[in-house]
Image: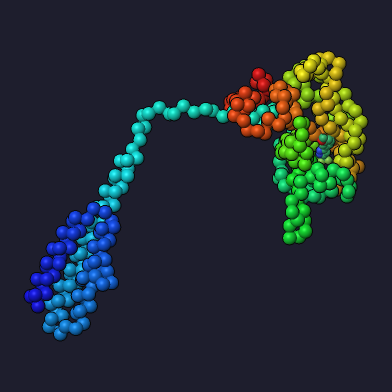
């Protein structure tokens, strides 16, 4: 028996020395397995207790249990020391000098399309319009059917419209070809009078020098009682004066056709062309800037309103083209190339926020 106790004392001394030497978690783990694992030195001896007689077990039992507990405690104490030391080393390696100056960085710029969009919103907000937005991925009924596009209308064709694959109900979603579905959604959601301005991305399967498959459009809609073309013309004139920042703009309307308006018009403003340059507000030439009209009674009816009680006007124009015109960027496709040099040249500073009182573009 005293043999066993002597042996245990030697084992404890040996394990204690190994634990004190261990410098990382994996060597501590190796010691734990060696002593307390399935086939560990202490574990096997504990199993041997079953073969001893009662007298022996009375002495060996507490001795072995005590040894197991002390070694376990020594291992976990050593482990805390080692992890704390490793943590301290990691933190020391990561130390940064908070007094160093910030690395010089290149500030980004606001894209001309974003800037012009903000200008347009600002102008129409000043006329009492409210901003509205809707999804880029639309349902056929909002993009076409409710807007009085007959089945089989050429604008619905695959040729112009990006259709998504049919979903499990056989419904074919599409990328909106104009922002007009937002007008429909607005009229379905709120009672007139309505005055909304709706900028956003639109998509048509078209790509050449003057068309990109994604472009930006802004549309406006007014629905109220006794609305007439005079309101439309006055609104558009106020917009053109504010946007081009000139006191007088010559404006003319030509008859046109859109499914969702009757009558429909295209609007030109007076300009002067010399070479590639276009100057707004002088000269005897004309430049088309937008389409508009009185909202078709079918559209008003489709939105659950009585066209004998509610009338309105709507208009739409391309933002990208307005941005080219106003800020003189000649190539439409460069708008969407993401070239940092172009963005630096044509972009706006973050704090150049357009405002009516500050002068839109200063
Ligand atoms: C245009 C031209 C003319 C238009 C019509 C509507 C609605 F929803 F009220 F019917 N929204 N936008 C409209 C009318 C758009 O863009 C060239």
Residue 347 can be seen, yes or no:
no
Which residue is painted at 71% across and 45% down in the image?
135
Which residue is painted at 77% across and 59% down in the image?
170
Compared across the picture, whether 136 is left or right of 268 comes to: left
The picture quadrant where one finds residue 12 is bottom left
Q: Given the current orientation, which residue lies at the most extreme front position?
A: 208
Q: Quadrant of ligand 1?
A: top right
Nearest the viewer among 160 and 268 is: 160
Q: Given the current orientation, which residue lies at the most extreme bottom position?
A: 53
Which residue is painted at 75% across and 41% down in the image?
203
Compared across the picture, whether 162 is left or right of 228 comes to: left
> Up-down: is 356 above or below 45?
above
> Up-down: is 308 above or below 318?
below
| Residue 29 place in picture, x, y as percent | 27, 61
Compared across the picture, whether 14 is left or right of 77 comes to: left
Nearest the viewer among 317 and 118 is: 317
Nearest the viewer among 234 and 289 is: 289
Nearest the viewer among 80 and 300 is: 80
Which residue is painted at 52% across and 27% down in the image?
106
């Amino acid at each position: 028996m005293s043999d066993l106790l002597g042996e245990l004392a030697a084992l404890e001394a040996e394990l204690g020395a190994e634990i004190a030497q261990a410098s990382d978690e994996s060597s501590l783990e190796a010691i734990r397995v060696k002593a307390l694992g399935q086939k560990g030195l202490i574990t096997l001896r504990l199993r041997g207790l079953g073969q001893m007689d009662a007298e022996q077990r009375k002495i060996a039992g507490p001795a072995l249990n005590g040894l197991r507990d002390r070694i376990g405690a020594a291992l976990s104490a050593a482990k805390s020391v080692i992890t704390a030391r490793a943590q301290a080393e990691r933190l020391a390696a990561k130390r940064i000098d908070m007094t160093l100056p910030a690395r010089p960085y290149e500030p980004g710029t606001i894209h001309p399309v974003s800037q012009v969009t903000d200008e347009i919103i600002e102008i129409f907000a000043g006329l009492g319009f409210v901003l509205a937005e809707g999804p880029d991925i639309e349902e056929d009924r909002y993009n076409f059917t409710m807007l009085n596009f007959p089945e089989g209308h050429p604008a619905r064709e695959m040729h112009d419209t990006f259709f998504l694959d049919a979903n499990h109900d056989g419904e074919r979603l599409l990328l909106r070809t104009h922002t007009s579905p937002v007008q429909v959604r607005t009229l379905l959601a709120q009672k007139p009078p309505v005055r909304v301005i709706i900028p956003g991305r639109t998509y048509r399967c078209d790509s050449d020098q003057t068309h990109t498959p994604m472009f930006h459009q802004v549309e406006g809609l007014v629905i109220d009682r006794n609305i007439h073309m005079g309101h439309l013309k006055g609104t558009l004139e106020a917009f053109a004066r504010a946007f081009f920042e000139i006191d007088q703009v010559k404006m003319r309307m030509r008859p046109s056709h859109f499914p969702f308006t009757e009558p429909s018009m295209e609007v030109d403003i007076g300009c002067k062309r010399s070479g590639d340059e276009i100057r707004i507000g002088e000269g005897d030439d004309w430049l088309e800037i937008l389409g508009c009209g009185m909202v078709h009674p079918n559209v008003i009816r489709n939105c659950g309103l009585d066209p004998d009680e509610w009338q309105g006007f709507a208009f739409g124009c391309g933002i990208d083209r307005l941005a080219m015109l106003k800020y003189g960027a000649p190539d439409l496709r460069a708008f969407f190339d993401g070239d940092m040099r172009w963005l630096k040249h044509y972009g706006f500073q973050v704090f150049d926020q357009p405002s009516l009182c500050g002068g839109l573009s200063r």
